[in-house]
Image (spheres, rainbow, N blue to C red):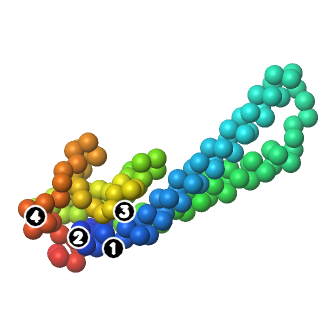
């Protein structure tokens, strides 16, 4: 069963969510760099018609990829444990489930935004983002308000 947030509860999670999203972006970039390094080594070996691979460098890059994979998994799981849904690492998009007029919807936040100012229906996704207004605030609730 999902956790449902009020706007106040969701915003109280933002410092931790922002820290985790920033960490995810760094880990992803490091993973991609290690992956590109391994690909380049493979291409050099192929272009040379075979050669002894630089074992130490390959080992270091594989260890970097593995560590980043674990870090990505852990950070994403922590976001999920908080009750949020990570939608996109690149933009830092995170959804916070809430109930609006007894229907599940998402309050959404992107890295760089000062607070949670938008919401959307589950089926609409981020393209359907709407400004949080007084009508929304009066008619949304979290778990504690049930």
Residue identifier under label 2 = 6
Crowdedness near tag 1: few (<14), some (14–19) or many (≥20) residues, C-alpha within 10 Å: few
Task: Identify whether 33 is placed above or below 75.
Answer: above
Residues 58 and 102: in front is 58
Q: Are marks 4 and 1 in contact (CB under 8 Å)?
A: no
> Can see residue 59?
yes
Q: Which comes before the other along the chain, label 1 or label 3?
A: 1
Measured from the top left, where is residue 92 in percent x and y? Answer: 42, 53
User: Mark 1 or mark 2, which has the lower sequence index?
Assistant: 2
Q: Position of residue 50 (x, y in %)?
A: 88, 26
Q: How far is the residue under mark 3 from the one under mark 4?
A: 23 Å
Q: Nearer the viewer, residue 141 or 2?
A: 141
Residue 133 in the image: above or below residue 47: below
Marks 4 and 1, Cα distance to the nearest angstrom? 19 Å
State the CA–CA distance, disc 4 to disc 2.
13 Å
Image coords of residue 17 (percent x, y): 42, 65
If you read the primary sequence from the N terminus, does the residue marked by circle 3 or circle 4 appear first? 3
Are the residues tagged 3 and 4 within 8 Å (C-beta)?
A: no
Name the side, left or right, on which 76 lies relative to 135. right
Which mark identifies residue 134? 4
> Which residue appears at 79% of the width and 51% of the height?
60
Q: Which mark is residue 84?
A: 3
* Lower sequence index among marks 3 and 2: 2
For label 3, count other residues whose C-alpha is less than 10 Å away and answer few (under 14), some (14-19) or many (20+): many
Q: Is residue 43 left or right of residue 110?
A: right
């Amino acid at each position: 069963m999902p956790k449902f947030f009020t706007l106040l509860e969701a915003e109280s999670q933002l410092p931790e969510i922002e820290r985790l999203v920033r960490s995810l972006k760094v880990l992803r970039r490091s993973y991609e760099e290690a992956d590109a390094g391994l690909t380049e080594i493979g291409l050099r070996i192929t272009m040379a018609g075979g050669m002894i691979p630089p074992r130490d460098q390959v080992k270091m890059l594989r260890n970097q990829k593995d560590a980043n994979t674990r870090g990505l998994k852990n950070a994403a799981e922590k976001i999920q444990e908080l009750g949020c849904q990570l939608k996109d690492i690149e933009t830092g998009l995170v959804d916070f489930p809430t109930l609006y007029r007894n229907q599940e919807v998402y309050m959404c936040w992107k890295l760089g935004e000062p607070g949670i100012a938008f919401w959307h229906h589950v089926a609409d996704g981020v393209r359907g983002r709407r400004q949080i207004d007084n009508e929304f605030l009066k008619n949304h609730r979290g778990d504690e308000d049930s």
